[in-house]
Amino acid sequence: MEREKKLFVFGEDYGTSFVKFGPVWLGEKPDVVENRGYFPRVSRVLERISGLPAREVVVGPDVSDYLETREDLSRLIYPMRHGVVPEKDEKAWKVVKEVTRYALLKYAPKGPSIKAAVFEGFWCVSAIAAQAPRYMYERIFDIHREINEEEGGKLVKAVTVIPQPLAVAIAHKAVSCVVVEGGHGNTQITPISRYVIRGALIPLNRGGSDANRMAAQILRDAGYGDLAVEEHFVRQFKEAIGLVPLNLDKAIEEAKKNLDKYRAVYRVPGTDIEVDLGKDSWQRFLIGEYIFNPAHELFESYYARGFSRPRDTRLPGEVIPGTVDLAEAVTYAVRKCPIESQPRLYRQVILSGGNFAWSVPRGMEGVAVDSATKLRYMLAQRGVQANVKLTDKPQYGVWQGAIVYGLYVPAELKWDWNSMEGWVFVGKRSS
């Protein structure tokens, strides 16, 4: 059974914007699909004409074929806005289930192949947010069990769950470190010493979606309000023109003096749509800065106009302001750990997640920086010398760690709620 398991380990990284998934044989890069589902209008007439059954929820690439007007985007559901699916949100859980089904069926061995001949189900490693409550673990187990039964009983053999930051640490073979996992809906600051130090975990309620909100506000202010309502476009715009400044005030000053060099122009591929921020191109630095320090005084004018601040993080006995700067949040998390372990934790601060994958255009070096340089600079301003590095593939580090974890969890180890390790068997056990 151990040999069978190593052949069919299947990683599932449930990000708030994308699900990264696939079996061990994909190597270093997983498949990717948006973590969303669309609930289309059901037409019984068209169902009869086409001969195809109506679909309650559509996931994967087919979503774009079903989208209707911009006003109907309320039926487009992103289930993990802040890394956690509300317990009673059945629509969201249906999306999670169908995205999981889509991922598993895409890679289930079929036809006359050696893999298909011995395949009795995937060994799934589901990576979810570190702050996910117990009910999320239970629903993940249930979803895989239901899918396996509905698809004939040989799609899923067993399931385990791993916190996303721990998966990143495993991918880097890091025993003691601080993982800062920046996803679409949140940022998980997680000190790790052989396992997640849950008492020091700080999940900030801001991530790529907040950078998107800032990008949308900039679009509205520039007269592109009709485009600002489309999340997919806003994300493309953000990724194309957004920059992280080393020092925001100096970056704005430089951008205003050298407009041609820092001008933000984005043309949507395959369309005649072009966005040009013109003399306000300095605002491109606000998109990246908002992730690192939404407390900067420049953002106060946005808050005064009704732009919502990031939500506070409520922990037992304390509240972490949503606008806390990232360096302060990291040092606060580390201070919760024993003093003698703190220097060791600062030796490896690992940034992971798509929200830290900011590029530096040629010619803008020193003014615009990558995420590791930005956080290292901010920590140094607080008197902390830290070794900060960005994962080689920030979008895929969690999936890679999940695969490694699945390879090493013993096949006979049953799930234990105390250690939060082991397999929940949902399919047929090998003899």
Image: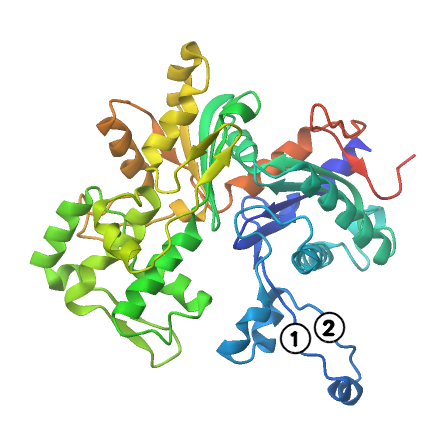
Indicate whether 419 appears above or below 151: above
Mark sitting on residue 40: 1
* Residue at disc 1, secondary structure: loop
Q: Position of residue 299 (x, y in %)?
A: 26, 51
Report the front residue among 104 and 273: 273
User: Left or right of 315: which side holds 410?
Assistant: right
Indicate whether 325 appears above or below 243: above
How many other residues sit within 10 Å of disc 1, few (<14), some (14-19) or many (≥20)?
some
Indicate the quadrant where residue 62 lies: bottom right
* The furthest residue to the right: 431
Q: Which residue appears at 35% of the width and 38% of the height?
A: 324
User: Left or right of 112: which side holds 329?
Assistant: left
Quadrant of the rendering where the N terminus is positioned = top right
Q: Amino acid at mark 1?
A: Pro
Mark sitting on residue 271: none
Quadrant of the rendering where the C terminus is positioned = top right
Q: Position of residue 8 (x, y in %)?
A: 73, 43
Indicate the quadrant where residue 105 lies: bottom right
Q: Which residue appears at 73% of the width and 45% of the height?
A: 139
Q: Which residue appears at 78% of the width and 46% of the height?
A: 142
Q: Which residue is mark 2?
A: 55
Indicate the quadrant where residue 256 lies: bottom left
Looking at the image, is mark 1 or mark 2 earlier in the sequence? 1
Report the front residue among 35 and 373: 35
* Residue at disc 2, secondary structure: loop
Distance from disc 1 to disc 2, alpha carbons, whole Å, reads 8 Å
* The furthest residue to the top: 340
Say if residue 368 shows up in the picture.
yes
Q: Amino acid at mark 2?
A: Arg
